């Protein structure tokens, strides 16, 4: 059973001491590809470097997370643009809006989002999208641009049924994380994940974040890693009334097509 983790923050410093072991465990658990998320200038560079060192196994994205939107300027724009010609870079992002944390001013977030959508139009690469508590502005910015953008995935979707239907109507793909394994916060997602068509569903860990709470025995650390994608697969399959083999097959196929792996 082969799996693709479409979003893992392996550039995060929590992996510095044992990144090789983390990758080995991922492969042992059936992970055939991992998309390493770029979220700022430094992580973009590290993600690309990792992908170059592990060809065919690791790929990367290049972009600016809304948390860092006030850092967006000409230099960063040109840096991201330059990376898009690298064969290991398979998407633009992580980009979008985050009004939950508001680590950057909302206007700065909107500007940075628009600039990265410009890059998506120019490069013909798909976009790796982030949205939290900003659905209306997110859709308003994104909707008129989608006719000129190859594909987009709503990474780490955690929203409502209404929001899910709106994103599907836009033609977006949906990424499901270990949020669905949370018996407190994930109940709504457990109930609506079956609404995602087979050909629009992907799974991810968002490591080192969102450790699946359903893991047994409980890990000694709260750090998530790609090897735990199997737990996300198990819960998604259960909630959709499908076999794990079926969900593994479709999500792997969709991811490979989406990112042109």
Image (cartoon, rainbow, N blue to C red):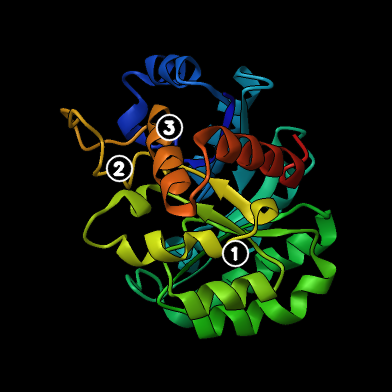
- The secondary element bearing badge 2 is classed as loop
* The C terminus lies in quadrant: top right
- The secondary element bearing badge 1 is classed as loop
Tell me which corner region of the image, top left, top right, bottom left or bottom right, holds residue 67: bottom left
Badge nearest the viewer, 3 or 1: 3
Disc on res. 212: 2
Distance between mark 3 and mark 1 Cα atoms: 39 Å
Q: Earlier in the sequence, mark 2 or mark 3?
A: 2
Q: Label 2 neighbourhood size at 10 Å, few (<14), some (14-19), many (20+)?
A: many
Left or right position of 102 against 4: left
Viewer-nearest residue: 163 or 238: 238
Q: Earlier in the sequence, mark 3 or mark 1?
A: 1
Left or right position of 152 against 160: right
Circle 1 is placed at which residue position?
Answer: 73
Residue found 83% across the figure and 73% down from its top? 147
Q: Position of residue 40 (x, y in %)?
A: 50, 51
Q: Earlier in the sequence, mark 2 or mark 1?
A: 1
Distance between mark 2 and mark 1 Cα atoms: 36 Å
């Amino acid at each position: 059973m082969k799996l693709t983790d479409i979003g893992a923050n392996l550039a995060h410093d929590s992996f510095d001491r044992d990144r090789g072991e983390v990758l080995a465990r991922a492969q042992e658990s059936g992970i055939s590809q991992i998309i390493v998320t770029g979220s700022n200038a430094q992580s973009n560079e590290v993600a690309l470097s990792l992908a170059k060192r592990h060809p065919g196994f690791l790929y990367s994205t290049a972009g600016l997370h809304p948390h860092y939107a006030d850092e967006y300027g000409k230099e960063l724009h040109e840096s991201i643009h330059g990376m898009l010609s690298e064969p290991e870079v398979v998407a633009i992002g992580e980009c979008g809006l985050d009004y939950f944390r508001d680590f950057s001013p909302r206007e700065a977030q909107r500007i940075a989002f628009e600039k990265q959508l410009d890059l998506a139009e120019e490069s013909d690469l798909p976009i790796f999208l982030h949205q939290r508590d900003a659905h209306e502005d997110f859709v308003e910015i994104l909707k008129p641009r989608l006719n000129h953008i190859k594909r987009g995935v709503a990474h780490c979707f955690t929203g409502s049924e209404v929001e899910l239907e709106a994103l599907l109507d836009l033609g977006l793909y949906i990424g499901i994380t270990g949020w669905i394994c949370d018996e407190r916060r994930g109940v709504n997602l457990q109930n609506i994940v079956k609404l995602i068509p087979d050909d629009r569903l992907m799974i991810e860990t968002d490591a080192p974040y969102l450790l699946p709470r359903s893991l047994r025995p409980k890990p000694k650390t709260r750090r998530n890693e790609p090897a735990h994608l199997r737990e996300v697969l198990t819960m998604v399959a259960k909630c959709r009334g499908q076999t794990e083999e079926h969900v593994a097959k479709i999500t792997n196929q969709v991811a490979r097509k989406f990112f042109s792996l």
